[in-house]
Amino acid sequence: MDITINGEEGLLQAGYHKNEEKNKKIAVILSDHPKRGSHMNDKAIYTLYHTYTLQGFNVIRFNYRGVGLSKGEFSGNEGEITDAANILDWMEKTNDKYEEVHVVGIGFGSWLALHLLMRRPEITNFALISPIVEGYEFNFVNPCAANGIIVKTECQKESQKEKIKKLYKDLEKMNSGETKLIRMNTCCCKFESKLKPLFDNMQEFITKK
């Protein structure tokens, strides 16, 4: 269903799926940078959203401030971190007594997902898909206990590939849960021709945890 949720700069446009069986699992899906054409209804984000709905999760995806019908101005930084945290707060209040919390991001959304992971100990699982984005660093990793995957794509620059290796090693070293590195033969966030492999990888991650 289409809903709006209060953000710091006004209402945020969101798509929300409530599991009819009152499942105790929730997931937040975070899109890539809007300058790369991403939004809550693009094919890759909807594929992730659909994957979680099929696994019985309560799931939400949303447009960042200034994107679609969301109010405010996109900041590309703390503003979106705050909005993502507010979305997670809303999900936890709406689905009390939750037992699993997943955060999933593509590109810029991976940067937001990792910020949430470092700040919110209730997060049990994470997925960072094509995580390295020009201008954004991932040097704030702290010890955590969640299980997660990093999905590496094939057309990234060598410097970006090295950053992904370092991010993976840092998470593997500091994470008391399990972190896996997956390679997909596609270009960055452009999953249009690889939606089925994206679906399959995420389904395996969700079901095996």
Image (cartoon, rainbow, N blue to C red):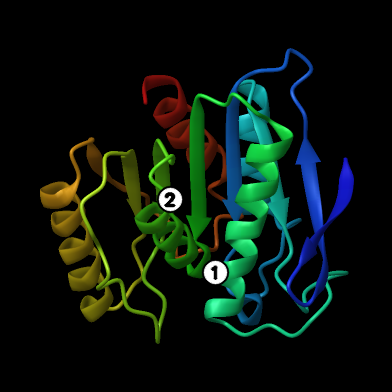
Q: Which residue is mark 1?
A: 81
Q: Look at the numbered disc 1 and give the secondary structure of its residue.
A: helix
Residue 123 position in % (x across, y down): 43, 41
Image position of 30 (left or right of 205) = right
Q: Look at the numbered disc 2 and give the secondary structure of its residue.
A: loop
The correct choice, above or below, for 18 with respect to 87 in the image is above
Q: CA distance from mark 2 to mark 1?
A: 12 Å
Q: Residue furthest top?
A: 21
Q: Which residue is mark 2?
A: 120
Q: What residue do we see at 77% from left, 29% from top?
A: 18
Packing grade of label 2 (10 A; few <14, some 14-19, many >=20) is: some
Name the amino acid, label 2: Arg
Q: Nearer the viewer, residue 191 or 159?
A: 159
Q: What residue do we see at 80% from left, 48% from top?
A: 15
Q: How many marks?
A: 2
Tag nearer the camera, 2 or 1: 2
